[in-house]
């Protein structure tokens, strides 16, 4: 874990200025109540919205980092929530749990071997009163990615999210060897899931190559938008098929494999979040644009 060390090298003046985004009440409250988890060496530090280390006792280097980089961290928090508002539905589809926990959201950083530029962020919510006493009771709500130097995402960020699903599947196989009593008993499920993941990746890659990385609605005709919408919908269908297979696996595991099933549940959660992202933010957005076009009969 090297997030503190990598972020300490970033100069706020080198980052692009964030364009103002009018946020709804949910996103605004989450920004105000956003906790961070940053790693330094083998230690993961829990940091309050006011940049106080809550747990464990911080090193001098971590205290120094937070004191000197407070403006940078404010920028990053705003960047996180802006990304969630534009390229995600994580807060929307988990709003019930978030609001039950007084809009407390926890963002756990993982630097993506990019010299401090790109981060995967896992999001959780937790009761404010039990954050420190029952930390393990946090609720996983999903994951997203940020690039400190680029807000705009190619293909709505789809390729990165699909790559993440493949990486998670590989991690799931490792956890199976560690946590399952008899991994061979579930061989058929792992084979089926691998086949769905590989098909999703290969077919989606071909579809994305045929699409514009960024959509200029002023230059596209109605038929072009309809075709783009259809291609993204097809990608979503592959994700739905994978989600159904993972869900079936989860149902089987609930009977005897409590130590492992939670990892499958988190994987299914990420799949469900991505399906919702397609339905609401990609296909929903494109359909709205299509319906709004003025065409001659």
Image (cartoon, helix red, strand yellow):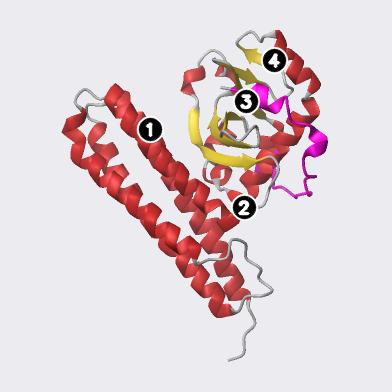
Q: Is residue 68 above or below residue 205?
A: above
**Left or right of 126 on screen, residue 33:** right
Q: Residue furthest right?
A: 13
Q: Give the alpha-carbon distance from disc 1 to disc 3, as whole Å.
A: 21 Å
> Under tag 4, what secondary structure?
helix
Name which of mark 4 and mark 1 comes first in the sequence: 4
Which residue has dot 3 on it? Answer: 3
Which residue has dot 1 on it? Answer: 171
Q: Residue furthest left?
A: 185
Q: Give the alpha-carbon distance from disc 2 to disc 1, as whole Å.
A: 25 Å
Q: Give the alpha-carbon distance from disc 4 to disc 2, as whole Å.
A: 31 Å
In magenta stretch: residue 9: yes
Q: Give the alpha-carbon distance from disc 4 to disc 1, as whole Å.
A: 30 Å
Name which of mark 1 and mark 3 comes first in the sequence: 3
Quadrant for the N terminus in the image: top right
What residue is drawn where x is 69% and y is 73%? 218
Q: Position of residue 126 (x, y in %)?
A: 55, 26
Name which of mark 3 and mark 2 comes first in the sequence: 3
**Left or right of 76 on screen, residue 209:** left
Residues 169 and 45: in front is 169
What residue is drawn where x is 66% and y is 20%? 47
Name which of mark 2 and mark 1 comes first in the sequence: 2
Q: Is residue 210 above or below residue 250?
A: below
Which residue has dot 4 on it? Answer: 62
Q: Which residues are magenta?
A: 2-28
Which residue has dot 2 on it? Answer: 153
Q: Is residue 221 above or below residue 85?
A: below
């Amino acid at each position: 874990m090297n997030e503190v060390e990598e972020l300490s090298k970033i100069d706020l003046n080198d980052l692009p200025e964030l364009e103002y985004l009018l946020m709804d009440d949910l996103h605004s409250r989450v920004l105000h109540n956003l906790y961070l988890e940053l790693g330094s060496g083998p230690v993961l530090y829990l940091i309050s919205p006011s940049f106080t280390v809550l747990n464990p006792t911080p090193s001098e280097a971590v205290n120094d980092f937070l004191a000197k980089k407070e403006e940078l961290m404010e920028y990053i928090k705003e960047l996180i929530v802006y990304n969630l508002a534009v390229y995600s539905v994580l807060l929307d589809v988990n709003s019930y749990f978030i609001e039950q926990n007084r809009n407390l959201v926890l963002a756990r950083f993982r630097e993506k071997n990019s010299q401090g530029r790109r981060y995967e962020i896992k999001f959780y919510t937790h009761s404010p009163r039990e954050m420190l006493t029952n930390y393990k009771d946090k609720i996983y709500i999903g994951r997203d990615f940020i690039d400190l130097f680029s807000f705009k995402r190619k293909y709505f960020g789809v390729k990165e999210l699909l790559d993440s699903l493949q990486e998670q599947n590989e991690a799931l196989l490792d956890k199976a060897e560690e946590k399952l009593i008899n991994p061979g008993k579930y061989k058929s499920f792992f084979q089926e899931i691998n086949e769905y993941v590989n098909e999703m990746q290969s077919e989606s890659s071909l579809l994305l190559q045929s699409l514009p990385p960024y959509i200029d609605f002023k230059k596209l005709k109605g038929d072009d938008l309809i075709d783009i919408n259809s291609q993204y919908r097809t990608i979503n269908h592959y994700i739905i098929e994978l989600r159904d297979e993972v869900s079936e696996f989860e149902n089987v595991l609930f009977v005897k494999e409590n130590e492992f099933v939670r990892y499958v549940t988190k994987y299914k959660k990420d799949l469900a979040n991505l399906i919702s992202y397609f339905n609401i933010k990609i296909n929903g957005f494109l359909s709205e644009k299509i319906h709004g076009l003025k065409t001659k009969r």
